[in-house]
Image (cartoon, rainbow, N blue to C red):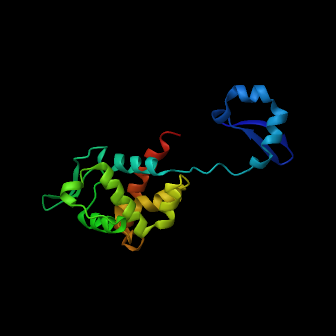
């Protein structure tokens, strides 16, 4: 929760008790707190930034509810998406190429850590700027949306027909719910 400690003209100064605690506000006092927050006197809400583990956990939960042995997206009775991140064979090949590894799809798609490395290679090939921000813990929700929809719809998800756009939008909504449930 954000507490307003002093308003001067059109600028309001805030203290973030979750970061500094009540004792900090009481010990330092509002005048010192006001002076030390002059740089943070933004009128826009704080931006939600996300890191690698947080996004991957949300994707894994959306895809398989954390089940490393999950099988899904059946076509003609055969599962096309396998493992904790529900990765297709073509995604695996692209991700392995991007990561510089040669791993067997059917042997290693069940291993969460290898899947994450393959996802890293895939995103490195198709969304390097978003990946860099994610790895630095500075990814915005827009970055997370692009990476999530890329994971679900492939590298050209944005140019696909309306059905695919709707599917990736629904997928992103599920991932976003998992990202924001802890806020």
Q: Residue at x 24, y 51 (%)?
A: 110
Q: State left or right for residue 3 relative to residue 18.
A: right
Q: Outermost residue, bottom direction?
A: 159
Q: Would you identify the image quadrant in which residue 155 lies?
A: bottom left
Residue 167 in view of the camera: no
Picture mark count: 0
Q: Outermost residue, left direction?
A: 77
Residue 31 in view of the camera: yes
Residue 100 to residue 108: above or below? below
Question: Residue 160: x, y in percent?
Answer: 37, 72
Q: Would you identify the image quadrant in which residue 14 lies?
A: top right
Q: State left or right for residue 136 relative to residue 98.
A: right
Question: Residue 32: x, y in percent?
Answer: 83, 35
Q: Residue at x 41, y 64 (%)?
A: 123
Name the quarter where the N terminus is drawn: top right
Q: Would you identify the image quadrant in which residue 103 lies?
A: bottom left
Q: Residue at x 53, y 52 (%)?
A: 137
Q: Nearer the viewer, residue 108 or 17?
A: 108
Q: State left or right for residue 71 relative to residue 91.
A: left
Residue 72 to residue 25: above or below? below
Question: Residue 119: x, y in percent?
Answer: 36, 59
Q: Nearer the viewer, residue 53 or 40?
A: 53
Question: Residue 3: x, y in percent?
Answer: 71, 35
Q: Nearer the viewer, residue 53 or 141?
A: 53
Residue 101 to residue 15: above or below? below
């Amino acid at each position: 929760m954000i507490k307003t400690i002093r308003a001067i003209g059109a600028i309001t100064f805030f203290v973030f008790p979750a970061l500094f605690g009540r004792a900090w506000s009481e010990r330092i006092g509002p005048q010192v707190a006001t002076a030390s927050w002059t740089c943070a006197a933004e009128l826009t809400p704080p931006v939600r930034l996300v890191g690698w583990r947080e996004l991957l956990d949300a994707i894994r939960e959306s895809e398989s509810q954390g089940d490393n042995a999950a099988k899904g997206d059946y076509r003609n009775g055969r599962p096309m998406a396998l493992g904790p991140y529900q990765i297709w064979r073509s995604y695996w090949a692209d991700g392995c190429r991007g990561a510089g590894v040669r791993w067997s799809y059917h042997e290693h798609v069940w291993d969460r850590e290898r899947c994450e490395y393959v996802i890293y290679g895939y995103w490195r090939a198709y969304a390097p700027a978003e990946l860099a921000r994610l790895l630095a813990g500075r990814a915005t929700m827009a970055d997370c949306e692009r990476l999530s929809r890329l994971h679900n719809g492939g590298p050209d998800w944005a140019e696909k027909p309306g059905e695919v756009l709707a599917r990736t939008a629904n997928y992103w909504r599920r991932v976003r719910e998992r990202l924001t449930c802890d806020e």
